[in-house]
Amino acid sequence: MVFTTDSTFAESVPAPAAPPKTIKLPPREWIKQNLFSTPFNSVLTVLFGALIFAAWRGLLSFTFSHERSWDAVATNLRLMFTAAYPQEQFIRIWVCIGFILGLAAITVGAYAVASRVRVHFLAERTMVFGGVIGVSGLLAPFSTSATVWYIVIGFGLLLPGIAARTQIDEEATLPLMGLLGIAFALPVLSLWVIPYGHHALLDGELIAEPGTVARSSSGPWTVVLIISYALYLLVAKVMNPSAQARLKRAVVGIWLVSPLFLVFIILRDPAFDYDHIASVQVPLFLAYAILGGALLYWLTKPGVGEIGRIVAATVLLAAIGTFLFSAFGFGGMRQIVRILALALAAFALLAPTFSGEQAARRRYVRVWVITVLGLVWFVTAANSPSTVATLSDWFPGGFSVTLMVATFTLILSFPLGVVLALARTSKMPIFRVMSTFYIEIVRGVPFITVLVFFAIMVPLFLPSNMEISQIAAVVVAYSLFSAAYMAENVRGGLQSIQAGQHEAAEALGMTGTQKTVFIVLPQALRASIPPLVGQTIGTFKETSLLAIIGVFDFLFVARTLIPTQTFFLGSLKEGLLVVCLTYWFFTYNMSKASQRLEQRLGVGER
Amino acid sequence: MTETAGNPVRDLSQAADMIMCDGVSKWFGDFQALDGITATIKEQEVVVVLGPSGSGKSTWIRCINKLEHHQEGQIVVDGVELTNDLRNIEMIRSEVGMVFQQFNLFPHLTVMDNITLAPIWVRKKPRSDAEDMARALLERVGIPEQAEKFPGQMSGGQQQRVAIARALAMEPKVMLFDEPTSALDPEMIKEVLDVMKELARSGMTMMVVTHEMGFAREVADRIIFMEEGQIVEVGTPEHFFTNPTEDRTKLFLSQIL
């Protein structure tokens, strides 16, 4: 998270042409012009200033009141974030955190090597931060010595900030990466030094002792920090530019695929049966990769013409046939064979769109091979027994389940939503009617109904030999529901494309698919970023509804579990505040990220 | 501007037919936009279509690459009749370049990508060839240095020249221009017309809907005058501007000249 939040103020250097400097007013002039320009505005300023003051004071006296028992949260942090995940398996979670931060470091290294931050920007933030700390010290119900400490720290930040703001040249900059490294390293180092206190519930015993946090927390964070920084240095300093460029393209794909693999590491760690894999999965993969690849290489040849269309349609029919005619001797067929046949049909039908020179054809085949590999791995992994000992189906819980459900819902519902939107705007009545029907049904049903249906009813309807874990059912429910709303957002984007764009693409002889892929969708998705992000944030927060079907989600832990623990009877408010702030932190960063994405893609400047 | 005397009349009677329209009619609801249009455009010929607004000029030119569907009559482009067969339409469209009044560049792509997209994916050209060609075309329309810009960063005249380059990149046999200068500021009209004149001289078959009388007089081999969905008068610029036969043509000329 460090990387996404802090790069807000990143400025790419060298800038192509310096924009004209905005004239900075001296503070007194600025206050006069912006806060007290008219008598009415002065009244408003005073009124709202008082309001902010009162709210801030209220929050502080709530937080630092003697009635608060923050031990309740500190002791239960593990419960709030990972619920009943077996403690001896925590190394898996650290591996995932390390992977994500390492990938983030590689991404930053490949993309933002030259970014720099203006010293003035930092100085202003430091001044504001120091000021807030100082004022908070005065407002909060502290003892005298604590108040003095707060004021000293506040001034300790304010004064260097002012000094830097006035003494250092406006154009001066610092490297972003050094600052990010420090911003990440300081909290991690503080784990070793500052006595945050050590809290734990061990076998019903409450351990609450002063001193630094347990080494089982500070150790892994330090290792992760060192690995991330080493990866960054490797990418940014050691690698040559052409390798960096290749890496840039690869990281986007890795980001998209990695959640799937990470969840498997955390939840299952499948125990592969290697003999079986060698005798069944590997030949299957090779057959589809080689034969399918050869077929696609031929189909993408320019001018393959009518025969290509016939072959692609035949593959589609055969694929559908494997699903339909299980009664006629195909019953023993492996599901993966059918899934791959369907995927091959999709690739074959799209082949004319992506046909072209040899390099383009090889790329298409490469994408196919990777798709086959991913599908075979996924199905094999899902079918292998898990090695992670679990207490129940619901051992993931707390904030981790929020993150997991939200991430998967986003990944699954986005493509589905785009397909639904395209179908709804399609010229083919059958697609239009089906899509409209689906969207209107879903939008007409309360989400809780869908959730309960999928969590409780769907497992009952499944054939007896087929099992679906409750979390998978829930993710499907969230995805199907969210997709309908996403479809409406994307449809708005599709409709905002001017007729001229369609005409220009058609006049160049593009096929319908080419027009959609290259011209319409990129623009439509760009235009629908704000509502799509709103929908994503909504889904993220709606995960708290999981409590209804008995999942120990983040909110549920804070609201119901902690206040019933013997040691912390009735400590409700502390947990709720932490939950609020955590949700806020994530949603705020999501909307910040989307704003940057919009700027990058230039939504406003057409 | 030395050619004020008009375009020297070329003998195109031996040239092959490029576009052949026979009794083309089209209705928008009850309103008849085209009423039995019959005309033939020869290879290398430059035809300018004139007429008051609402006379069906744009509708006609848009029928020729099937952006509008005609309901009666026959349109044959380069020997292929326009039917409702999709592959037929796509083939004809890739042979016929079109330049729009509103440019219709793709705003999310750079100038280079705007020009190379269709050659790469429709014509299946190798990317390097397509890019070489795009650079040559940008040189030809006079903006070689703008390849990496986005359309939103350019002036209207530059955008229209990119649009012409984009259409030329498909190596079309015919170019259709649908009021290419009507959305431009006056000082940018000339730069676009100069490109079109150069194109006409290079032997491109062109059909131009425009209100630029100077261009029509200077470049056109033939002028077709339309009103209320019908062709009223056809003739050389010489004939059309100095000695029109039809009353409606005279009225039109008296209003604009």
Image (cartoon, rainbow, N blue to C red):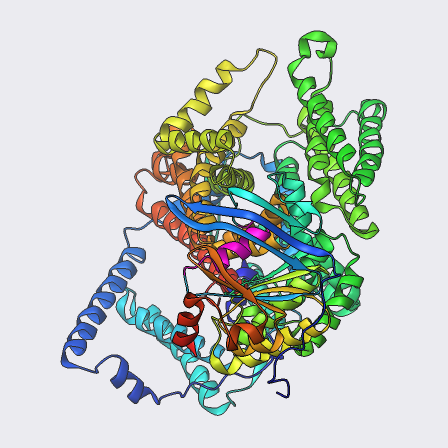
Front one among A165 and A458: A458
Can you give x and y, in whole percent of width and height, for residue B106 in the image? Answer: 57, 61
Q: Is residue A218 visible?
A: no
Can you give x and y, in whole percent of width and height, for residue A87 in the image? Answer: 58, 37
* Residue drawn 39% across the image and 87% down it: A24
Can you give x and y, in whole percent of width and height, for residue A238 in the image? Answer: 79, 68
In this rendering, would A277 be left or right of A606? right
Front one among A316 and A546: A316
Q: Quadrant of the N terminus of chain B?
A: bottom right
Can you give x and y, in whole percent of width and height, for residue A100 in the image? Answer: 63, 51
* Residue drawn 35% across the image and 40% down it: A568
Up/down of A155 relative to A327, above or below = below
Q: Is residue A278 visible?
A: yes
Specify start and end residues of the magenta stretch as a single range.
B54-67
Q: Quadrant of the C terminus of chain B?
A: bottom left
Up/down of A570 relative to A18, above or below = above
